């Protein structure tokens, strides 16, 4: 969608329900299948098929972290099992390279969950705080209902294709969830970290986890949040940044790999120009 001049502003107003401030730049082209962008004042800056239900891949782990932070203490220690490791490796998923018998704190496992998008960490956390994955997924869905995410349903804690593509959500619901999750200082600290190192101890090996969210290194004022990919979902990016004294949160669903970061950067700058012109 390319929007230009006076006509473009009118079209944008119809699409997202708000008028562009005078002098604001044209909205960038967005190739993702679904997208949504809003700031902390409630101004919607962009929308594209934002209420369409789709799989969201590892963006599911945002809700996993949200539930864990409500259930756990950060210094709780979890022992990694062979099942946790096998869950990731047998499904060809991204991992935090955890090994059977390691004992790690919830705080560290949250980094392993969110930065390298470890399905092994997701399995360990869900197993502990369900207890068991079935009970944990039920907690995820209850949390979604409590947050008003009426177009969101989860089937697992990691977004993997089985079962049911990890469930479904919408661009609007993903942004709502991120806004709530970012209010938690621990969540914000984790997702805004580029690299997290865990020193070797008697309880576990040394780990270095790098954030898969390249936007953190591409633009100023980026706060996080999460990348994702499956064949069904395509490349996804839930992102947030500070612009013009406001927090701007957006999502791209069903995009291309590198393009999602480029588009997110342009959308953040676009929102910043709209805020400044308002």
Image: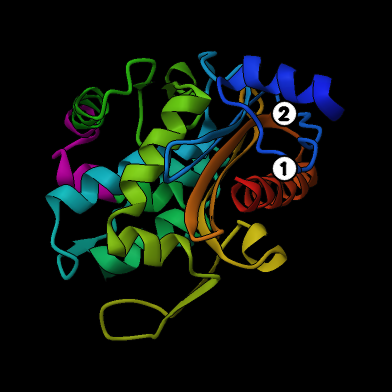
Whether residue 213 sits left or right of residue 6 in the image: it is: left
Tell me the element at label 2.
loop
**Which region of the structure is painted magenta?**
125-136
Observer-nearest residue: 43 or 265?
43
Tell me the element at label 1.
helix
Observer-nearest residue: 102 or 32?
32
Contact flag, marks 2 and 1 (Cβ < 8 Å):
yes
Q: Which mark is residue 99?
A: none
Q: CA distance from mark 2 to mark 1?
A: 8 Å
- The prevailing secondary structure element of the residues shown in magenta is helix
**Residue 264 seen in the current view:** yes
Q: Which residue is mark 1?
A: 260
Observer-nearest residue: 27 or 113?
27
Which quadrant of the structure image shows residue 34? top right
Which quadrant of the structure image shows residue 157? top left
Q: Is residue 68 magenta?
A: no
Seen in the picture, residue 75 relative to 57 is either above or below; the reply is below
């Amino acid at each position: 969608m390319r929007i230009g001049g006076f006509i473009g502003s009118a079209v944008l107003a119809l699409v997202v329900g708000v008028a562009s401030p005078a002098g604001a730049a044209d909205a960038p082209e967005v190739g993702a299948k679904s997208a949504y962008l809003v700031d902390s004042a409630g101004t919607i800056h962009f929308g594209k098929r934002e209420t369409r239900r789709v799989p969201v891949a590892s963006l599911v782990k945002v809700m996993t972290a949200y539930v864990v932070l409500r259930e756990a203490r950060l210094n709780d220690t979890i022992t990694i099992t062979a099942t946790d490791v096998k869950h990731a490796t047998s499904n060809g998923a991204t991992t935090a390279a955890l090994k059977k018998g390691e004992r790690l704190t919830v705080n560290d496992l949250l980094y392993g969950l969110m930065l390298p998008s470890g399905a092994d960490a997701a399995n360990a956390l869900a197993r502990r705080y369900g207890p068991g994955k079935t009970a944990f997924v039920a907690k995820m869905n209850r949390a979604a209902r409590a947050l008003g995410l009426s177009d969101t349903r989860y089937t697992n804690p990691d977004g993997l294709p089985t079962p049911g593509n990890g469930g479904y959500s919408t661009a609007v619901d993903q942004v709502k969830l991120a806004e709530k999750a970012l209010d938690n200082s621990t969540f914000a600290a984790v997702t805004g970290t580029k690299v997290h190192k865990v020193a070797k101890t008697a309880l576990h090996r040394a780990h270095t986890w790098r954030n898969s969210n390249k936007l953190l290194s591409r633009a100023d004022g980026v706060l996080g949040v999460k990348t994702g990919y499956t064949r069904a979902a395509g490349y996804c990016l839930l992102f947030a940044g500070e612009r013009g004294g406001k927090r701007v949160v957006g999502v791209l669903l069903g995009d291309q790999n590198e393009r999602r970061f480029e588009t997110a950067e342009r959308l953040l700058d676009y929102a910043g120009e709209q805020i400044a012109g308002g």
